[in-house]
Amino acid sequence: MMLDYQKWVSSPKFWLGKLRLIAITSFSILQLGIFGCTESPINSTTSSDSPANALPNSIIPEMVEVPAGTFLMGSTDVPIAHPEYTLELPTYYIGKTEVTNAQFRPFVEGDGYTNPDYWTTPGWQWRQKNTITQPLYWDDSTWNGDEQPVVGISWYEAVAYAHWLSAQTGHEYRLPTEAEWEKAARGPNGLIWPWGDDWRDGLANIEEAGHGVTLPVGSYPDGASPYGALDMTGNVWEWLSSTYKDYPLTVENEWGESYLNQWQEDGTIVSRGCSYNCGRSGSRAAFRSSSDSNVAYNHFYELGFRLASDSPPE
Ligand SMILES: [Ca+2]
């Protein structure tokens, strides 16, 4: 995968994408000059003018389909997930794995940390104030293997990456909502763990597996959810687009400009999916957690993310 990325960076297609992006950015600045408008940084990243398919497929996170329909959310057995209730979602797509360091690398080495177009307004202010230019553990060999999930990132960086990838590919990626994450993990009938209702050893990188560190994503293929999503419990916690709310939830748009821009540094954002450091009770797929938007700055290396999308990538 690293080889593919290096080939991509040195390819004419990469530099063509760069030039296109510069042209789009320049055009946005020109628009501001002519019309005096305050263009949304978020809207401009999802422009259909974005360079299409500039990245090699190996760098783009793989997605699995979750078909439309109802599902069981919450659990009477998990105190913070009361009550159990039914929701319905349209078809959507979710990352087969957590986003890896190799997949995050072109965002770091490209203009991910220098172009405010990808960031929410509070996120960009946070990045500037703290001079954030890469994930916290980017240079730490314990955490930075190509196939390990990216960690040490704030929610702001996860959102910016989704906008950046959308701009690179012309396909809109986002973070999953809490409801989408739970259905993808538990299937339509509310499984206790992604693989079923009975605990089985050797299906997840949680504390009792004894690794004490993140593993390459997808290291437990037999622990797949009913839709084929991997590491839905274990390896790293995963940022979602949802703020923490009491159940029952309703299905809402959580990827609009005003929604994303409302979360300041103390925004309470849900994370799901358990880490290598979770006990068995926390590894239940209904278990909920949350963190402040800027939590990477507090040295948290158990937290990464996976993507979602409304439509299948081409
Ligand atoms: Ca996980």
Image (cartoon, rainbow, N blue to C red):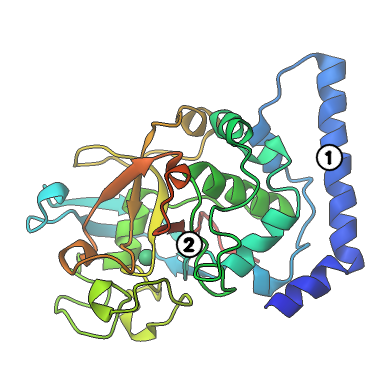
Residue 107 in the image, given as x and y percentages of width and height: 68, 55
From this view, report whether residue 288 is shown above or below residue 65.
above
Alpha carbon distance from label 2 to label 1: 28 Å
Residue 96 in the image, given as x and y percentages of width and height: 47, 70
Earlier in the chain: of badge 2 and badge 1, it is 1
Which residue is drawn at the image coordinates 53% and 64% (left, top)? 99
Where's ligand 1: which quadrant?
Answer: bottom left
Depth check, front residue: 17 or 237: 237
Residue 151 in the image, given as x and y percentages of width and height: 49, 59
| Residue that numbered label 1 is attached to | 24
Q: Dividing the image into 4 quarters, which one contains the N terminus?
A: bottom right
Classify residue 191 as left or right of residue 6: left
Given the image, on which type of amino acid does mark 2 rest? Tyr
Depth check, front residue: 156 or 32: 156
| Residue that numbered label 2 is attached to | 93
Which residue is drawn at the image coordinates 33% and 74% (left, top)? 225
From this view, report whether residue 290 is shown above or below residue 71.
above
Residue 135 in the image, given as x and y percentages of width and height: 57, 53
